[in-house]
Amino acid sequence: MHGRPRKPLKPEDAAASAAKAEKLRVLQSQFLHNHHNHIYSKEAVELSTKLLETNPELYTAWNYRKLAVQHKLTENDSDPDSLKSILDEELRVVESALRQNFKSYGAWHHRKWILSKGHSSIDNELRLLDKFQKADSRNFHAWNYRRFVAASMNRSEEDELKYTEDMICNNFSNYSAWHNRSLLLSNLLKRKVEGFVSKEKVLPDEYEFVHQAIFTDPDDQSGWFYHLWLLDQTVRVDSPQLVSSWPTPGSDLILLGDRCLDGCASSPFTRFHLDSRTFPLVLYFNQAVEGVNSSTITVDSELNTNKDLVWKPLSSCNSKAAQVWVTQLNLPDGNTHSSKVFPVEDSSPISSLYQLSIKNDNELTDFEWRAATIAKEIDHFRELLSLINCKIGKLTLARLLMAHDAMMCPPANKISHSEEVLELYNDLMRLDPTHVQYYKDQHSLVLLQQVTSNWESLLSRCFHYSNSPSNRGSPMCLQLKNLSLSRLGSFDKLLWVQMLDLSHNELRSIEGLEALQLLSCLNLSNNILGSFTALEPIRQLKSLRALNISYNEIGAHSIDTTKYLCSSPLSHSVGSEWNHGQTVIDDDIKSYWEAYFILKGLNLTQFDIVGNAIVNEKFKSFLIKVLPGLKWLDGEQLH
Amino acid sequence: MEPDTEPRGTVTQREQSMVLNDVNMLYHIYATVPPIAQTLMMELQRKNHVEYLLRGLQQLGPSFCSLDANRPWICYWILHSMALLGEFVDADLEDRTIEFLSRCQDPNGGYGGGPGQMPHLATTYAAVNALISLGGEKSLPSINRSKVYTFLKCMKDPSGAFRMHDAGEIDVRACYTAISVASILNILDDELLQNVGNYILSCQTYEGGIAGEPGSEAHGGYTFCGLAAMILINEADRLDLAALIGWVVFRQGVEGGFQGRTNKLVDGCYSFWQGGVFALLRRFHSIIGESPTPVDQRGAECSIDNTQTTTASDVSEGDGSSDEISSQGDEHCHFQHREREPLFHSIALQRYLLLCSQDPRGGLRDKLRKPRDYYHTCYCLSGLSICQHSWLKDEDSSPLPRAVLGPYSNVLEPVHPVFNIVLDRYHEAHEFFSRS
């Protein structure tokens, strides 16, 4: 889609160019005539050659040539000499067309087509590629074609790896070469080719290689991006792992009254209040997984009368994979007033949960060098930063430190680096105003990680709210307000939260919050949420009863592009969701479809929305219709 | 890579530093001239741009022979630029354009690069967007939707991705143009969107951006195409959006403009391809300074850090009122002056576009020393609009003066970021195609 490079036009050339264009137009109409009438004579094909050598963009002419070749091949039935000369001519035309414009999609594609006929030699193709890759070492058409040739002509990946090395040594800013190197190495490691059996052996050399580039000129981006890939290769554990769950492993849940389950005093974070006859079990994985069901997860529970629990992925689209999986456990009837212990999540079911995170020996032995490698890199970049002030170096150091902390999780007597990382992001915000919002988001994530890293820190932010303090098992509210959060994270540590105060932050979205399945009260007031669709995660929070979104910016933006991120009557791929229930409040849906879409399935009893641009009397009456269970609206009791 | 024996810097670095010199010199000049000259330099030269655009539409100059397979594109670049500037073409020119594009329409569906050429997905997208940018009772009905549908079906590869044209290449561009056309013409169905998402997903690289085809490196144009297509088929969250943002954020360089790929030179057209990604994700905000948040009536009794009075009081009581959560203690009064920076630097980007990309004689360009052209005019203006409309106060208002660099007359029409069509025309087309 990008405009091809064109030579600037000098005035004195204009006349000549006009004449040339006229000639070209004549040629083109002749060509189209030939094409439409299936004329493949020698003269006709030559005409298309002339045309393509001037303008390789004429994709119709490339297709015409394919037809002409087929035509000639059927005529000259299996004569190898004529086959060769026909295809040689095609190769020649492509090459001269590429000389005219080496970014022509049609020309490169035609060459692939010729090769699929089993013609040309690898040396020939590499010679051609060499020429074009020298002329423009970042030409992605040439790199794509190179990968195609190497794969289809069985050139060894080691040879290609060597080629990237040469290219990099020639110009270490050439990111295309670094990129291809990452692909080749991934493949070699995956296939466990000799010499590439373990990352432990291969990656140290790569780190050294990239250090040369980075330390030669720390301001050059290419090496840093390759370093990012190396870091990812170093920390990545391929099999999915269960990061956390609710209830927490090894804890008993006690049904205290008909409305309260309490953890067996072992931890305050297993207390649970419920106002329905079901409560959720939540699994949180480190990556999206599929196939969680009653045959892959065993839950032993006295409560679990219906043996086949239905596990559901929490995802906003209808995807089968999700990071968070939920099932609902039913409480039995009766037993409503006697305290009784239900060992819902005893050690046995938890151990079966943990079977999911199969840690094979390989990964365990790997751990040593992974950790050592990261530690070494941290030292390297601390040293670099002590010499020069380098933004991307600070960012890399921040990422390395976070990777280090994550690897040491749980932080068994290890000192967390979060303070240092926060300081790095503060620095970056000052040094690099262009990317300040990104750093701010990262800062928020690190801050949340710090707050949630241990129980003491979490407890210091928990408060009880109750009219009667003696009330056994009154709920705890986690306060994360006034932290300048612009993004949310660390949900795996917050699965137990039922009341959450995120007010007075700078949130524009609450992505990921759907993981907190126990949430019953949520305060998002005084943030900068711009629309109802930014609240999409709360559609999945079935326990939510009180929601405060007052003093945000809902309705203040005329172009709400988030609406394309969630299903709506405007997005043609969804429809079914909109077919029912529309009759009730048909007119209002038109004006407030976003609000309707978000609030429809919720059973809110309290809702605060004052201080948003969208609020007026009409909207309030719409809210009362769409939320029939509502008892309090903006602090006023409804009748 | 022997640092000592090499000449100073790589080729890439020398080119980069040349560009940076140019840009810095211009920024320096701007900083030192008197304010009245500054205003002039920052002004969008509307009249000259319109003249330049109209010239292109009336007679596609002789130098455009190399684009002869791209004529609908030229129509779209020019008509969309005109629409962004809030200008209309006269009836005669409108008729001629519609007539010309109709001749590009293949009898079996889709639009080719010119009359008689094979239908092609990119030119089909360009023709459809051009006709929508024209708008009106003649333009929209000239599109043969059922034939376009047939064409799209033919371009669908068994893998789920799309081909550019019969026997043509498969890539993310093809997926986006197909899905965009199908969506806006209201002919998108399950069959067309089947497995498109899998293909696009396979093109996201470890860098975070999206490549043209699997194995290739991340690229601004394809990242926009891939994300926009994923949004249209409602599968955007299958992408690693955090990584995508991380990649695109750092494509904005010190010049203020965006580069298309890692360690490439800045280019004005990526103002839209990369800047548009932020618009798509709605993660940007302009600098707005003090927001006029209304202060709550109960504000007087508020306390900023009173932990005993927050949203909820009690959900656990056994009696009938336990579900009601009093909000008496709710506090709203912690009034903050929030300086909100955009996730990309909107003002810096506008500065690059107006000072470096703008040719004062009309038209916009890649960078200084490069010639203007219609492609760059279209995408530089689209990027400028994205910047200006990154924050709006309410439904009917125009952008805040602080969000707009230069005189307020620089404000362009807002665009629908998924299709890159001016919002009004999008609404007109959407209504027209949902009727039938």
Image: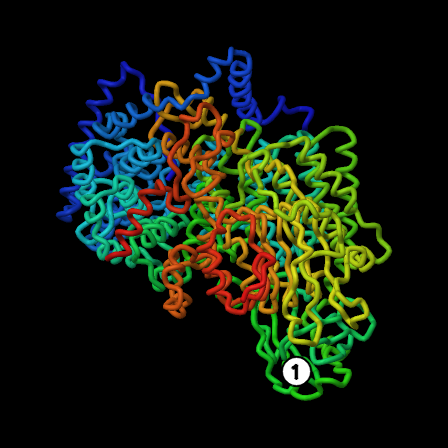
Which residue is disc 1 drawn over? A331
Q: Residues within 10 Å of mark 1 (few under 14, many from 20)?
A: some
Q: Nearer the viewer, residue A456 or A104?
A: A456
| Residue A380, above or below A150 | above
**x 39%, y 70%: residue:** A580
Q: Count the marks.
A: 1
Quadrant placement of the N terminus of chain A = top left
Q: Which residue occupies 25% across, 42% down?
A: B135
Residue at 31% across, 17% down: A10
Give the image's coloring scheme. rainbow
Secondary structure of the residue carrying numbered label 1: loop
B325 in relation to A89, above or below? below
Q: Residue furthest right?
A: A413
- Residue A59 located left or right of residue B334: left
Report x, y in % for residue B164.
33, 49
Q: Position of residue B74 (x, y in %)?
A: 29, 35
Tell me if B346 is positioned left or right of B337 in this view. left
Among the 4 quarters of the image, the one containing residue A128: top left
Residue appearing at x 57%, y 28% in the figure: B254
Chain of the residue that carries numbered disc 1 in the rendered image? A
Name the amino acid type tagged 1: Leu
Foreground: B223 or B228?
B228
Query: Residue A268: x percent and y percent?
Result: 79, 67
- Establish if B310 lies above or below A332: above
